[in-house]
Image: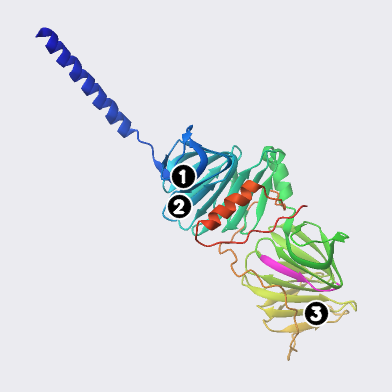
Amino acid sequence: MRIRHQRLVFLGLVMFTGFSTFTLAVGRMPDVVGKVVSSSNATVEGSVLLSNRTIFSGEAVDVGEGGAVLLSYSPTGRAVLAASTHVRFNGGKGNIVAQLLSGTLAVEREKKDAFVVKTSTYKFAPQSEGRTKFLVALLPDKRTIVEAQNGKVAITAAGSAGSYTLAEGLRAEISESEAQNPDQQKEGASKVIGQVVSSTGATRNGKPLPDGEWLLDGDLVSTGASGRAVIKLWPTNQATLEESTTATFSRPVERVWLNLLTGTIVVENTGESNVLIATAKYHIEPLNAAAGRILVAARTDKTTYIDAIAGDVRIEEVQSQQSYRLASGEDKLIPANASGVPAPTENPTPSTPSNPEPFPSTPSASSGHTHSTLLIVAIAGGAGIAAAAAALAAGGGHSSSPVSPSAP
């Protein structure tokens, strides 16, 4: 009986200890990151990753060659892990951090869901609420590629309080040397003006200017007798250079300056960081922070023609710094020998503006200045990048057309 009693006590101790262990385990249950919608050639913490499996905070997912994982992390949020990708997840629903160690990760969300992608040197996150779709890729040569397909993406360097805003439709490339030298990044970023939408008979710095080419600070663009170039300017504006036109582009501050040397140019502004057009004698810009369209022609006879096609325009003579308001719908031909500001036209003659390429119909809604810290360049995306983007598009919802990459 004594032995039996000891056994009972021992069994009771085991049962009590087991229950305590189970209770502690339940108390430490990690947060849920999301649920796997589909999976191929992938593992989680070394075990085969099956569809419908829940991913918890702290778990790492590895995708092999030819594989892919589609993760649903909220009712409207999805993430795609492309082939040869290694990611460790932390946090839970509404506040997820994905530590990207290699490969390509594409993220899409409709609402406020917070999904941050981190690398060893940068953090990438939606800049504001609303629909956002972006992609981050760590390439074997140590470059980091970021693409903002929908909405804007905030890019923050590790240990930095400031961030850079990547506008919708643009890609950014960070080389390994740039990641280690923030000053070099800032210098490189300041050189980016925009991207060529279409180009016919146009040159940049004396060399042919192809479609999709990126425009840098100080570039001189010229169009031939039958040439034309349409350029999407940073961040959301657009300029059309008509035939026989020569202009230089710069960004001395957080704004694009277009120096028109000769010819005709049409600038469309969205009201966000409007473009300033400069001629030899005048500075022309929108009078108000609103969407508008301005045509300026610097003619061979030294006259200047200005048409406020849409929106009021401010004309300032550089030498006297006097300014004049040209109302929306008015135009003005300024003689070569004019001094001071031009007199208003009592009966403005209707102009015949060119028909520029359609302006982007969905410009970014947010505004404000940003601090550039990256060099944006055109790249040829790898197979993993294309696969991740295609997987998001195939999963339903809205789709977008990424910027066509081209070799520099």
Magenta-tinted stretch: 237-244
Quadrant (top left/top right/bottom left/bottom right) for the N terminus: top left
Which of the 4 quarters of the picture holds residue 300?
A: bottom right
Left or right side of 41 for 184: right
- Name the spot of residue 218 as percent of width and height, x first: 81, 57
Mark 3 vs mark 1: which is more N-terminal? 1
Residue contact between numbered discs 1 and 2, judged by CB atoms under 8 Å:
yes
Helix, strand or loop at mark 2: loop
Q: What's the mark number on residue 96?
A: 1
Q: Is residue 367 above or below residue 89?
A: below
Residue 240 image offset from top left, x and y in percent? 75, 71
Residue 274 figure quarter: bottom right
Q: Residues within 10 Å of mark 3 (few under 14, many from 20)?
A: some
Indicate the secondary structure of the residue bearing disc 3. Answer: strand
Which residue is labeled 2 in the image?
Answer: 113
Q: Within 10 angstroms of label 2, few (less than 14), some, or many (20 or more) residues?
A: many
Q: Nearer the viewer, mark 3 or mark 2?
A: 2
CA gap between label 3 and label 1 equals 55 Å
Q: Nearer the viewer, residue 292 or 207?
A: 207
Nearer the observer, 367 or 55: 55
Q: Residue 234 has which mark?
A: none
Q: Position of residue 179 (x, y in %)?
A: 67, 40
Q: CA distance from mark 3 to mark 2?
A: 50 Å
Residue 154 in sight from this viewpoint? no
Tell me where residue 229 sits by quadrant: bottom right
Front-most of residues 380 and 260: 380
Q: Which residue is mark 3?
A: 305
Type of amino acid under label 1 = Ile
Q: Residue at x 60, y 50 (%)?
A: 387
Q: Earlier in the sequence, mark 3 or mark 2?
A: 2
In the picture provided, is 289 more to the left or to the right than 244? left
Q: Amino acid at mark 3?
A: Tyr
